[in-house]
Amino acid sequence: MGARGGRRVLVIGGGIAGLTTALHAHEAGHRVEVIVKDALGDGATALAQGGIAGAYARGDSPAAHAEDTLVAGAGLSAPAAVDVLVGDATARIAELVARGVSFDRDADGTLRLGLEAAHSAARIAHAGGDATGAAISAALCARVREAGIPVREHAVLVDLLVSADAVRGARVLTEGRVEDLPADAVVLATGGAGQLFAHTTAPAVCTGDGIAAALRAGAAVADLEFVQFHPTILVSPGPAFLISEAVRGEGATLIDDDGRRFVFDAHPDGELAPRDVVARAIVRRAAAQDGPVRLDATALCRREGWSAARLAARFPTIDRVTRERGFDWTREPIPVTPAAHYLMGGIVTDTSGRTTLPGLFAVGECARTGVHGANRLASNSLLEGAVFGARAAAALGKPWPSGPDDTAGPVDPTLEPLPRSGDAGPFSRAALQRLMWDRVGPLRTHDGLLEALGVIRAWRAAPTATAPTARTAALANTTQEIPPLPRPAGGFDAVSPALRASRAAIEDVNLLEVADRMVVAALARPLSLGAHHVVASSSLAVDEPSPALIGAR
């Protein structure tokens, strides 16, 4: 890590949270190395379209932003963490500007602010119309390179190195070679676990690596049942493409085959209701009509007088991609479907990114800071990464506290006999993704969750190269209750040696680990809350009673 003084810090992840941490830590004199799974700049941050919340115009305030965040979080957000988020917002956005992010501005030079779902005011700053994440990522990557911070690319986190109940470094796989990297502090910024699901906006690198490694090391993890499903992903061949919520914020509508704005049946805010409400409404309506619903941006042209050129200027990326895929969204509504988008839960931290395990920090989507609660408010994630990345760097070298106030992780519920896991079939990542979408997606049932857990546990127990333990497969043809799996005593060392040269196999181990804990957390919460929605039957076409509305104004 070079000849600088300070503490040796490994930052694992290269999005807004990880790079903000790395820059602040470097500027404070620490010896920093950034570890990224692909090339620097790849990952979820660069894909973010909507923007970053926290730019307050006249009539708006941090207090109003905090209230919207708490309401969206359905009572599960930590007020202290939310106060930190909104209190630091102005400084962090100013820092991004200073680091080279060119946010969109009006003619008079003021930030051009957008409105998104469940926000009470327009407070979302954008860059390049719908390319905010790309602009932020490019600027931060450039600053990291200019600062001379070492970056190890194409390196996969295998496990954390733990000694005397503290994290002392990380084990990584680079080009088939495993290496132990000692450090005084490890900052996990590895993103979420969107690759658990058949439909996701997450890039291929989001396989829950940091969360799984933290679980194996003994750090507390919580709220994994809360997965946000973005309502509007373009239905077309090719990689999943998100249609930003900002499109609906500008006035686009969601319609069914009859041209009816059906989301008002579920919530008085219609298309601007919280994301979980909109996503469930779309799933139900699509099932009822046996086909996708449509996003109608032509309403902007008809009602608001927008020209095709103005729509393309406001949303250049969306305009380009939809046209490349054969749609003219200025003339016709386009088909959309929900997809897994963001994980509210993760590694439990305090407001400085410290986990329950000394020496280990977590920031960004892999962390459970307490900000998001049961449902993330739109465009709070980029802000969270910037705010808590800076705070984690400031905490490096300070005495470790006894632990975050909330260290409770999910616990195994009392399980009923599970379905015969002999029906699971052989493990594949695609099979896991289909299972998670069908049984742990926007609409969940108790029986479906039990079925998913039975299959996942059968896969984890199987003596294959991707099984994280050496358990027997004797449970495969029984109907007995499956007990909790113990945490592998040796982490990476407890799995097959074949994993030592296989990124895909390491990822599969991590996906199965996080999937298991996610389903267990969902079973432990039998009542609907926020993005976790449990219906009374497996029929998705029939409207079930909904939990109390959130975000209604």
Image (cartoon, grey):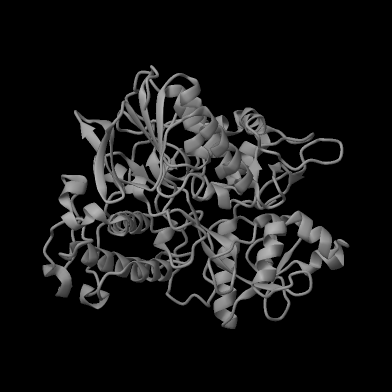
Taking 540 as reference, is 240 above or below it? above
Q: What is the x, y in percent for residue 504?
A: 32, 59
Q: Residue, x 86% and y 65% (percent of image)?
A: 303
Quadrant of the rendered image containing residue 466: bottom left
Taking 336 as reference, is 130 above or below it? above
Q: Can I make out residue 500 in this image? A: yes
Q: Residue, x 40% and y 64% (percent of image)?
A: 440
Taking 12 as reference, is 536 above or below it? below
Quadrant of the rendered image containing residue 252: bottom right
Q: What is the x, y in percent for residue 401?
A: 35, 23
Q: Is residue 203 left or right of residue 69?
A: left
Q: Is residue 538 left or right of residue 359?
A: right
Q: For this rendering, which residue is in front, 400 or 118?
A: 400
Q: Residue, x 43% and y 74% (percent of image)?
A: 537
Q: Is residue 517 left or right of residue 58?
A: left
Quadrant of the rendered image containing residue 384: top right
Q: What is the x, y in percent for residue 509?
A: 27, 56
